[in-house]
Image (spheres, rainbow, N blue to C red):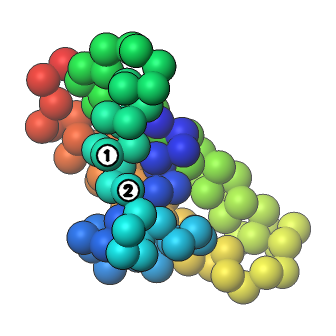
Amino acid sequence: GNTLAYWVQADDDGVMQMMRRQPTHLAGMLTRQEVIDYYGQKTGYQVDNFDFYSIYGLFRLAVIAQQIYYRFYHGQSKNTQFAMFGQMVNYLEQRCLGLIANSTL
């Protein structure tokens, strides 16, 4: 779940694309679901209802972004790229809430 929170695929919306830091969106890269399926095949684990781990990973990323934004907002960091992290936290919250609403857990 933590790894896949950072995993941006080609069909993700524009906000998620702006958060991309790795080339996971390029042709030939696995989708998040393909990564989950591959993990299950290689480990032999039954990977049912991955929603909990996806939500946890996104929530964890939101907490990290919130901490970075807090430091930027209070002048403890001067990197202007962090100015958008407050909006990123709100976006990640909405993604979590969407997953929760559609989950079968």
Q: Residue at x 24, y 23 (%)?
A: 49
Q: Element at badge 2? A: loop
Quarter of the image for the C terminus: give it: top left
- For this orientation, the residue located farthest to the top is 45
Q: Residue at x 29, y 68 (%)?
A: 12
Residue 47 percent coordinates (x, y): 31, 21
Is residue 52 visible in the rendered image? The answer is no
Crowding at label 1, few (<14), some or many (≥20) Cα neighbours within 10 Å? Answer: few
Q: Element at badge 1? A: helix
* Nearer the observer, 48 or 62: 48
Q: Residue at x 39, y 14 (%)?
A: 45
Crowding at label 2, few (<14), some or many (≥20) Cα neighbours within 10 Å? Answer: some
Q: Seen in the image, is 67 located left or right of residue 102?
A: right
* Residue 102 lies in quadrant: top left
Q: Residue 13, relative to residue 36: is it above or below?
A: below
Q: Seen in the image, is 73 located left or right of residue 43?
A: right
Q: Residue at x 79, y 81 (%)?
A: 79
Task: State how far apart marks 2 and 1 are (Cα).
Answer: 6 Å
Residue 99 percent coordinates (x, y): 23, 41
Residue underneath mark 1? 34
Q: Residue 23, relative to residue 3: is it above or below?
A: below
* Residue 54 lies in quadrant: top left
Inspect the image, locate mark 1, and give the three-letter code of the amino acid beneath it.
Glu
Look at the numbered discs 2 and 1 and tell me whether their residues touch, using CB distance below 8 Å: yes
The disc at residue 57 is: none
Q: Residue 69, relative to residue 62: is it above or below?
A: below
Q: Seen in the image, is 28 located left or right of residue 70?
A: left
Residue underneath mark 2? 30
Inspect the image, locate mark 2, and give the three-letter code of the amino acid beneath it.
Leu
